[in-house]
Amino acid sequence: MSGKKYLDFHGNSIHQVGYKNSYVIKAVKNQMEDLPFIPRRYTSDIVARAAAKLVNKTTSKDFKGLFTPSGTAAVGIEFVKNRDSKEKHEELAEKVLYKSLELGLSFKVSSGKCITWHPPLIVSINDIDIAFNIFEKAIVFSLNI
């Protein structure tokens, strides 16, 4: 192993943290004491800050963020060649995936064009910001090839 660190937004994060990991147990307990559940019709400071960071990475500041309550409905981004035809842009999705991995961010591509992020159970705003920055660099790099 090279010792390189990665942000794993690929999913199955509980497998990577191990069983009875004291750091995870403490973080989950702290979160449960602070704010155990947020229905979709309400928000919290951490959700609002994460959504703002996501929107600020877009070309239009008119977008809004929606965070889903489960990993199965995780953040997804669809790459298409043309918005009207919805033709898949599999080549771009693959380039972004591999450049992101090279830069230290792991995630999934499904249906050949959809990038899906499944952040770890314990993720900080700083980690999300780093992930967005890596993702943005990978997109810019991939579009300029």
Image (cartoon, rainbow, N blue to C red):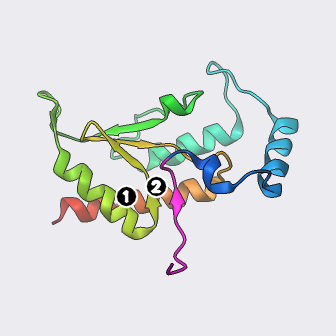
Q: Is residue 12 above or below residue 98?
A: above
Which of the labelled discs sits on residue 132, or is there none?
2
Q: Are marks 2 and 1 in contact (CB under 8 Å)?
A: yes
Q: Which residues are magenta?
A: 1-10
Q: Nearer the viewer, residue 87 or 59?
A: 87
Q: Is residue 3 magenta?
A: yes
Q: Position of residue 92 (x, y in %)?
A: 20, 52
> Residue 76, can we see it?
yes
Residue with the most extreme right position? 33
By secondary structure, the bulk of the magenta-drawn segment is best described as loop
- Residue identifier under label 1: 136
Q: Position of residue 105 (x, y in %)?
A: 45, 60
Instruction: Please name the residue shown 52% across and 56% down the image.
Output: 8
Instruction: Please name the residue shown 70% across and 34% down the image.
Output: 44
Q: Is residue 40 magenta?
A: no
As drawn, is 92 to the left or to the right of 43?
left
Q: Amino acid at mark 2?
A: Phe
Q: Position of residue 51 (x, y in %)?
A: 54, 40
Instruction: Please name the residue shown 32% across and 56% down the image.
Output: 97
Q: Secondary structure at mark 1?
A: helix
Quadrant in which the C terminus appears: bottom left
Q: Is residue 34 above or below residue 21?
A: above
Residue with the most extreme bottom position? 2
Which of the labelled discs sits on residue 35, or is there none?
none
Question: Gap between marks 2 and 1, in whole Å?
Answer: 6 Å
Q: Nearer the viewer, residue 74 or 34?
A: 74
